[in-house]
Image (spheres, rainbow, N blue to C red):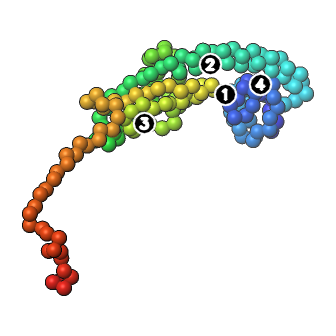
Amino acid sequence: MKVLLKQDVENIGMAGEVHKVSNGYGRNFLLPQGLAVIASPGMLKQADVWRRKAQARREELRQEYQALANRIENVRLSFTARAGETGKLYGSVTTSQIADALNEELGTEIDRRKVGVEPLRQLGEHKVVVRLGGDFQPELTVVIENEAGETGPTAPVYEEVVVETDDFDDEDEFDEDDE
C-alpha cells in the first residue's frame, strides 16, 4: 500500500513523502492515527502544504532540542548505592531512576526509554546518552558513590608479612629418593 505521510513518522519518513508500507500497518496504524492518507493524485497536491508545515515544525523542534541538549550536557547527577569491595553494586542504577532525576533537575518530561541503554552496575563516573531525536544525543554525567562515600572500587590493603626461619639450609633440599 502506498501512503502519503501527513506527519513525520519515525523509521518511515518525513511529512509529505510517499512510502510503500504493508497493508496491515497502513490500515491498522497509520490511517487511523491520522499520520498518513492513501496516496492518490488529489492528495499528492496537498503534499506540498504538509511538507512546508512539517519543515517549519522540524526547525522549531531542532531549536528546542539544541537548547535542551546544551542543558543536559551540563547536568551532573549523583546517586548512592551499596557496593562490594570490587566496586560492583548490589543492584543497579536504572535508566528510570536517571530519567526521573534528570526530569526533576531540568523540569522536563524526557521519556525513560530515551535515557541510556542499560542500567549502571559499577561505582564511579559514567557518561549516559539521552536520545532526543535525530542528531541530538547529548551525554550527561552520572556519579555513583558507595553509601560509605567512596566513588570507586576499594582495593583491599595487604600487609607484607616476612617469616624468618633458621630451620632451612640450602643443603637440606628435598631429595626425590627419600620418598
Q: Which residue in the protein does label 3 denote?
A: 120
Question: How far is the residue under mark 3 from the one under mark 1?
Answer: 25 Å
The mark closer to the camera, 4 or 2, is 2
State the SS at label 3: strand
Question: How far is the residue under mark 1 from the one under mark 2?
Answer: 10 Å
Q: Which residue in the protein does label 1 denote?
A: 134
Q: Which residue in the protein does label 4 denote?
A: 15
Q: Which residue in the protein does label 2 denote?
A: 65
> In the rendered structure, are the residues bearing label 1 and label 4 in contact, judged by CB atoms less than 8 Å apart?
no
Q: Quadrant of the C terminus?
A: bottom left
> In the rendered structure, are the residues bearing label 3 and label 1 in contact, judged by CB atoms less than 8 Å apart?
no
Q: Amino acid at mark 4?
A: Ala
Q: Amino acid at mark 2?
A: Tyr
Question: How far is the residue under mark 3 from the one under mark 4?
Answer: 38 Å
Question: How far is the residue under mark 3 from the one under mark 2?
Answer: 25 Å
Q: Quadrant of the N terminus?
A: top right
Disc nearer the start of the sequence (1/4): 4
Disc nearer the start of the sequence (3/1): 3
Label disc, if present, on residue 66 of the rendered structure: none
Disc nearer the start of the sequence (3/2): 2
Q: Note whether residue 39 is visible.
A: yes
> Which residue occupies the foreground of this view, 40 or 123?
123
> In the rendered structure, are the residues bearing label 1 and label 2 in contact, judged by CB atoms less than 8 Å apart?
yes
Residue 169 located left or right of residue 158: left
